[in-house]
Amino acid sequence: MSTTVAVLDYGSGNIRSAARAVAQAGARVKVTHDPKEVLAADGLLVPGVGAFAACMEGLHRVQGARMIGERLAGGRPVLGICVGMQILFEHGVEHGVDAAGCGEWPGVVTRLDAAVLPHMGWNTVRAPQGSQMFAGIAPTERFYFVHSYGVRTWEFAEDGLTTPPLVTWATHGCDFVAAVENGPLWATQFHPEKSSETGQKLLRNWLASF
């Protein structure tokens, strides 16, 4: 039986393209916000486009934060994409609105310090050694970004007792977090579903991590 992935349906605009890309990578996909289906799936993909606060409102309507937390408590894989990554941090500040996030990682999502926004197009990323997410992907490969906000400072405090997350960076005017690998929780600021074969390779790496 193929790997099952639930794509969380909470009103985000890029759900269908994300679902198609994960299906193309080899998973059996269900677009849903039903808690039983979300918790039973092998993997959960959390997409996201638009404003941080609006995405959090949609997430709360379907109790998405609780479902993400329950999956992670059981070591079950979750992948956040674009704003679906941003909402995993403590809070986001956009257009003067400071909204609380899911709080899986410390840190704040703020406007990028760049002359041209949004950051829209293809960029390389700087993945750390030992990354499973970027296994088999050359440093010269590019991913598709479209965003004006991001996490510019990584605030996770290492305690020496647990394995720290692996953080991937990119640059557009300033450095920002492009991806995070933290046990069962993975996330990307870029859109792997819009990143051609390179994005497909990353999605296959995610499915292989289950």
Image (cartoon, rainbow, N blue to C red):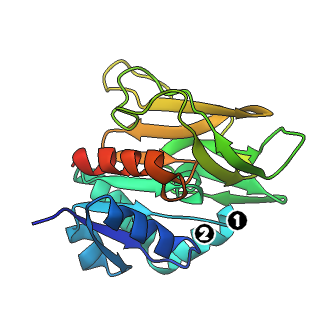
Identity, as a three-letter code, of the amino acid under mark 1:
Ala
- Residue 90 in the image: above or below residue 65: above
- Give how far across and how far down residue 201 sits, in percent: 37, 45
Exactly how many numbered labels are in the figure? 2
The residue located at (66%, 62%) in the rendering is 52
- Give how far across and how far down residue 205 sits, in percent: 31, 44
Disc 2 packing (10 Å; few <14; some 14–19; many ≥20): many
Q: Which mark is residue 65?
A: none
- Residue 107 in the image: above or below residue 156: below
Residue ID for mark 1 = 51
Residue situated furthest left in the rendering: 1
Q: Is residue 209 left or right of residue 51?
A: left
Which image quadrant is residue 162 in?
A: top left
Residue ID for mark 2 = 55
Identity, as a three-letter code, of the amino acid under mark 2:
Cys
* Residue 155 visible in the displayed image: no
